[in-house]
Image: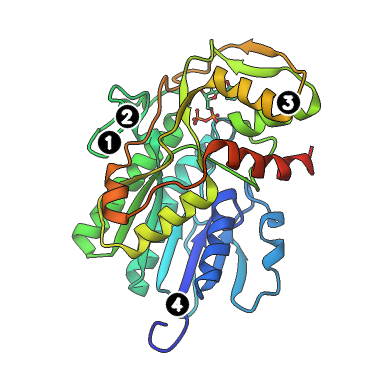
Amino acid sequence: MENNRRPRTLITGGAGFLGSHLCDRFIAEGHDVIAMDNLITGSVDNISHLAGHPNFKFVKHDVSNYIFIDGPLDYILHFASPASPIDYLKIPIQTLKVGSLGTHNALGLAKAKNARILIASTSEVYGDPLIHPQTEDYWGNVNPVGFRGCYDEAKRFAEAITMAYNRYHQVQTRIVRIFNTYGPRMRLDDGRVLPAFVGQALRGEDLSVFGDGSQTRSFCYVSDLVDGIFRLLMSDEQEPTNVGNPDEITILQFAEEVLRLTGSKSKIAYKPLPQDDPKVRQPDITKARKVLGWQPKIDRSEGLKLTLEYFKKRV
Ligand code: UDP
């Protein structure tokens, strides 16, 4: 309790995949939660189970415009942003605005309310990395003018302005660098590799492997990620912190894993590799282990089974 009342927490992007899971976690922790979302990539379906909950409120708003919240606020989690390559290719300007203007507004609100704020950053700040696995002190290898630049540079700006508010205005800030995450409430059509492959396998379509499939990713189950974020918010760590699962796999091996798991007879169809697609990605989570006492608990086979149950009902 903060001053004999429940902590009050704003989650921007609260109707999105990660945002909605954060709403669940913070309500379970006894917070009053305000979810804010413009529903461009989020959906009220992700929070419909919270409708009417006495500690939950939804506000439809685009946080790239001034954010008005009545009353006190203790925590802000700034998660509003398109996060799938096909989304930010379709809406690059909104992506840049929410990462820059939206982050500025969220920081201004944190300053006005004396709230602690956590910003969702990304492994994309490392770009196509030349250091592997990626440690927090790596500055990255980003093409600012490529198709991914709108997302990568918006998030890099978001980190920079967050540190400026921390140093110049003494706002309590946290920055999480999120690596590939999956689980229920991902959109089947969001274009990311996991929903794409699972959807294709369940529909009996060929699995679209981009390039030769030798590029790697490391997938974290959503409940592990949410736990890392909660711990980071409550910690004293102000520098960016990687949260993700270091279990790395090539995209081709991942396609084969999805075929095995679903028992699908689909084949693999090779498609052109998108521009600037990172060749490798694996979080170094030494810092999260040490500072947050955190590490992922759900391995890919367990997480995929849980996610498959969700997708089966939606294909
Ligand atoms: N990918 C793929 N087929 C798809 C979608 C993605 O082979 O239908 C590849 C993509 O080229 C990338 C990896 O899977 O190397 C992960 O892509 P995703 O869009 O999930 O996110 P990213 O990690 O690139 O941001």
Judge left or right: residue 77 versus residue 236.
right
Which comes sooner in the sequence, label 1 or label 3? 1
The nearer-to-camera label among 3 and 4 is: 3
Q: Are marks 1 and 3 in contact (CB under 8 Å)?
A: no
Which comes sooner in the sequence, label 2 or label 3? 2
Callout 3: helix, strand or loop?
helix
Q: Are marks 1 and 2 in contact (CB under 8 Å)?
A: yes
Which comes sooner in the sequence, label 3 or label 4? 4
Separation of residues labelled 1 and 4 (CA atoms): 33 Å
Residue 167: x and y in percent read 19, 58
Which residue does the numbered mark 2 point to in the structure image? 133
Residue 72: x and y in percent read 43, 79
Callout 1: helix, strand or loop?
loop
Local packing at callout 4 (Cα closer than 10 Å; few below 14, some 14-19, many 20+) is: some
Query: Which mark, by number, is residue 200?
Result: 3
Quarter of the view holding residue 57: bottom right
Amino acid found under the numbered disc labelled 3: Gln
Separation of residues labelled 2 and 3 (CA atoms): 30 Å
Q: Residue at x 55, y 19 (%)?
A: 253
The nearer-to-camera label among 1 and 4 is: 1
Amino acid found under the numbered disc labelled 4: Pro
Amino acid found under the numbered disc labelled 1: Thr
Which comes sooner in the sequence, label 1 or label 4? 4
Q: Nearer the viewer, residue 96 or 178?
A: 178
Judge left or right: residue 272 versus residue 140.
right
Which residue does the numbered mark 4 point to in the structure image? 7
**Is the residue marked 3 within 8 Å of ligand 1, measured from its CB?**
yes
Amino acid found under the numbered disc labelled 2: Pro
Which residue does the numbered mark 1 point to in the structure image? 135
Separation of residues labelled 3 and 4 (CA atoms): 43 Å
